[in-house]
Amino acid sequence: MQQSSKDAVIAWLKGRPIKSVLDAPSGDGWLKEALPPDAEVDGIDLYAQPEGRYRKFWQHDLDTPLPKDCGKYDLICCCEGLEHLGNPLLFLREVHRLLADDGLLVVTTPNAWYPQSRLQFLHRGFFPSFPPLAGKVVPGSHMHITPWTYPQPYVYLKLAGFKPPQILPEELSKAKHLHERLLAWPARLYCRGREKRATTEETRAYWQAAGSDASLLGRHLTTVTSKATAP
């Protein structure tokens, strides 16, 4: 996970009353180090074994139901995790079950919508960082298997019982090259047209988010949401 993405998450969390946190997947444990020392943080990861960093830690496959002895959490962070999962809806429904009613969820993934990524898909049929896996599919291994763009977390989070996600802008939300900004214009105009024709506030907000720089130009997607209803 890029430092600019971490900074965006940390800045958004600053000042929020968070006491209990689930970090899944935990990776190298950067989130634990970034949170206030009084936050009680549990971690889950299939590969990492960060001894002593977490209150509780489970070495666990996120494609299966989460450990039964997990508690309730004010904050659950899934940073660079969903792109590795074959069953993200199961995971998100488990997260909904563990999140406090007024809790917050942060989800970050690579973004497959930026123009350079679309051009590579047009030429090769594969998005950057999502290579062909012929001969490389090993169950339980660290593979990028599910590309994400803003419409995917919107649908999956809604199905899991969450509110429509908001995108956090960050340094990686900007175009790296002028031609990327130009190539994004057709999609931007389409989203703006749909936003103007929207008949509800939710659909208007959806098209506004989908047509934002963070959605169309960003190389990374950082979304935040909270519980809406029971799934």
Image (cartoon, rainbow, N blue to C red):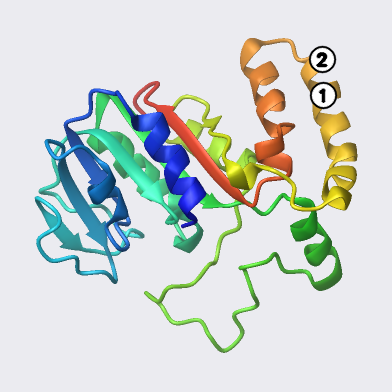
Amino acid identity at mark 1 = Arg
Q: Classify residue 16 by image quadrant.
A: top left
Q: Residue drawn 71% across and 36% down?
A: 213
SS at badge 1 = helix
Q: Is residue 191 above or below residue 147?
A: above
Q: Residue furthest bottom?
A: 135
Residue marked by disc 1: 192
Q: Position of residue 167 (x, y in %)?
A: 56, 33
Residue marked by disc 2: 196
Q: In this view, does 10 lie above or below 102?
A: below
Q: In this view, does 130 lie to the left or right of 199?
A: left
Q: Find the distance from the CA under tag 2 to the CA under tag 1.
A: 6 Å
SS at badge 2 = helix
Q: Where is residue 54 in the image (x, y as percent from the top left)?
A: 14, 53
Q: In this view, does 105 lie to the left or right of 192?
A: left
Amino acid identity at mark 2 = Lys
Q: Where is residue 217 in the image (x, y as percent from the top left)?
A: 73, 45
The reply to whether the C-beta atoms of the residues labelled 2 and 1 are less than 8 Å apart is yes
